[in-house]
Amino acid sequence: MSRNGVRFFQVGSFAVGNRLLDPEDRTVQADEQRSNSLTSGHRACQGCGEALGARYVLDAAMRASNGKVVVANATGCLEVFSTPYPESSWRVPWMHSLFGNVAAVASGIAAALAVQGRDGVRVVAQAGDGGTVDIGIGCLSGMFERNDDVLFVCYDNQAYMNTGVQRSGSTPPSARTATTDAVGSEPGASFGQGKDVPAIARAHGVPYVATATIADLRDLEGKIEKAIPMRGSRYVHVLVPCPLGWGSAPADTIRVARAATECGLFPVYEAERGEVVGVTRIRRKVGVDEYLSIQGRFSHLYSPVRRADVIDRIQKIADSNIRRFRLE
Amino acid sequence: MRHPFAITLDVASSLANKTGGWRVERPVFVDRLPPCNDACPSGEDVQGWLYAAESGDYKGAWRRLVRDNPMPATTGRVCFRPCETACNRVQVDEAVGIRSVERFLGDHAIGEGWSFPGRMSTASGNVLVVGSGPCGLSAAYHLRRAGHRVTIYETSASLGGMLRYGIPAYRLPRSVLNAEVRRIVDMGVTVETRHRVDDVLAAREDGRFDAVLLALGAPLAHHVPIPAVDSAYVLDALSYLHGAASGHPPQLGRCVAVYGGGDTALDAARTALRLGAEEAVVVYRRTGSQMPANSEEYEQALAEGVQMHWLSTVARAGDGELLVERMELDDTGFPQPTGVFETLEANALVLALGEETDLSSVDRAIDIHSSDGVIDIGPTMMTGHPGIFAGGDVVAGERSVTAAIGNGKKVARQIGAWLSGENVSAGSRHPLAELSSLNTWYYADAPRTVQAELERARRLTTFDEVVAGLNETDALFEARRCMSCGSCLECANCFGMCPDNAVHRVLDPLAKGPLAGGDGVLRAGGVRPFAFDYDYCKGCGICVSECPSGAIVMEPEVI
């Protein structure tokens, strides 16, 4: 659901801030008192979407919980670039887990807090797509089934990036990774594989499931703000482009995320107890070309010859999303 | 500090890791020249005053506006708005209604009785301005603001020149004109009306003026000999409009023909309808699309029932009728006679074939030269005679109210420089803010506000103003449609979207109303709301890509 309720010109609600808005109507990120949960000096690449997404999510969580957040973080890029021993970029209580067990660790933290009667402290588990979609899905499914009081946030950059861009269960069809070469008649990752974790989460019937991107800050912050005070398992899946793994320009990180939603490949919606209750409609619709052609991982679809057949199949996925979620 | 087993270092913050060293390019804030500012003949900082108006700081906006143009309620009505033609928003949806906001600010200032800010320097020259049209008034204002003593000599009974005697009241109500003229006079300008200058050198000597500005305008009608029978009624449009503006319009009869295709022709026809003519026909030798008249005025004239007779020249003016020859465009688009004649009913023929200057007052000054009917000036706008300057319609260049006001500003600056023995240094121009440097995603979709027009029945019987102004809500909305091309609009995208927290806010975001120097312009003192922290900026360029207004660029890092 789009949180574009405030219609103030000249920049309406699309920009981070707006000097014409009352401070309380501005985003968390527009506030110079924001927590900066992930502070400067971290070692993420130039233009890292995940670093941006993590700060967006945790700063919003900090505001929504009055600064009472405990974070469990799976192994992955986010952990590697933020905590090279002995430095830490985190300005929140933060705990590093194994690659696959962050949901279980967070469940344990929630249980410990419950035993102590500290129900004002909120628990956030965060992981990349590897720690969520592949390695961590067993623990995550268990957490959902028990309906543990945890907000699980997946920062989806669609491959194992810090180990050298290997395919994950979230890698989109045709994308080139270190393990899905762009060779043969069907270059890159296969069609028809991979897992739709937001749909899996919905199938568990948990209280809240949402998707978001770093290109729509107001929408993302609104979803975190809504999820934080809810009890039980909540899941937010955030698309975070990776300039390194996607072969996109560092300056284009937001642009790529925006194109993903505007072409329909990444539907932005929210669901309660398994039922979709709101979608963010496409504002300026574009074809999948707008999204694919600015990423090196799809360059084999455009050179040496334009692979209209493959692009067509990807467009069909986008069209199907637009129909299924009524994105237009 | 005692450490646990296998731990040797204290916990540290990543702030110790200065990632700025990764950078090969650095983002810097820039000011690009918005196309509206670039196009304004008066040199207004359009984006600057809209910026103040957007936050409801109308006084700050007006003060910013009158730095360049002392008559915004006037130009807010009669300007041809080159700013809106140039506006980048044209390519997004529709141009920002800059002129309608300017008019709102001008009217608001009159309503609130705002006066001009005090003088800006203590210059003390004694300057004579000959003529009180837009150029003369603008120059008087700017000279006065600089501290000079100013005297205006005006031939007519009232100040305003063509604003008063050329532009009809339905386009520029006299109450508005009077208020804006009075505000300039109230700065302490000495005015002598009905004072015709026959010899500029004598006038300068008599009044011991240090410098003279010839803002003589182009008050004479251009005449083309037209065969006419003795009983034919032929007059020129300028004297007709002058008569109408002075309250003594000549009676033209039931059916009036106007010969010409400019704004003056349309004004004469529209005025004739208002003064009782049942039909007004504009005869023009080319086609409608080639008419030099402003399209807006053309539409309004059509709506009022003015008839157009294209591709025709007047061959002879008869008694109650007009013989016209049909024309035909040749391959180069030039009209050629066809030898086919027709007769039109016309009790009077009004000639609107252009305006000419009257240079009789400089006849004795042999070192003031003219060519093609306009006075020659040098790069400092001075004529061949030291201390005598010229501007407005009497010199070569675009003839419009706004251009004349801009001319007045320029010549005032040159006069001031000449008096103090200095040179005016042309400020460097910023590169133009092209649409391609903007990220228009962030601008809310907002169609242009339409200004209401008076209903036809009242337009045919009165000189009431045809186009209505905007109310405050609409003016604010319209101002906020501005995309602030090339200038920071404080959206905080750079601040919020930096993955490395390397953009800091350096200005209090809670500050409301006028922010700097009391004139509501944030950057007036060079203060920007945000600053880059080059200790941590990795140079990714997201801030540049996502800046809506194109106010950040990447520059190569000097290694």
Image (cartoon, helix red, strand yellow):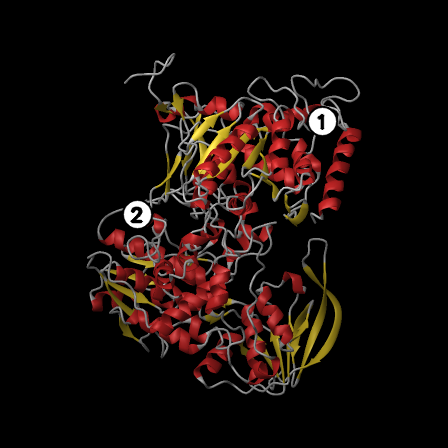
Q: Which residue appears farthest toward the top when viewing the image?
A: B6
Nearer-the-camera pick, A189 or B140: A189
- Label at residue A302: 1
Nearer-the-camera pick, B546 or B150: B546
Query: Is B141 left or right of A208, judged from the image as shown?
Result: left
Query: Is A173 left or right of B465, judged from the image as shown?
Result: right
Question: Which residue is at 31% across, 75% downward?
Answer: B195
Question: Which residue is at 35% across, 50% downward?
Answer: B522
- Label at residue B525: 2
Circle 2 Cα neighbour tier, 10 Å, few/some/many (<14 / 14–19 / ≥20): few
Residue B20, picture quadrant: top left
Q: Amino acid at mark 2?
A: Gly
SS assignment at label 2: helix
Q: Say yes or no: labels 1 and 2 on the same chain.
A: no
Q: Position of residue A53 (x, y in %)?
A: 52, 35
Q: Position of residue B3 (x, y in %)?
A: 33, 16
The CA span between labels 1 and 2 is 50 Å
* Residue B2 visible in the displayed image: yes
Question: Which residue is at 33% across, 78% downward?
Answer: B194
Q: Callout 2: residue from which chain?
A: B
- Label at residue A109: none
Q: Callout 1: residue from which chain?
A: A
SS assignment at label 1: loop
Q: Position of residue B121 (x, y in %)?
A: 22, 56
Vertically, is A75 above or below A33? Answer: above
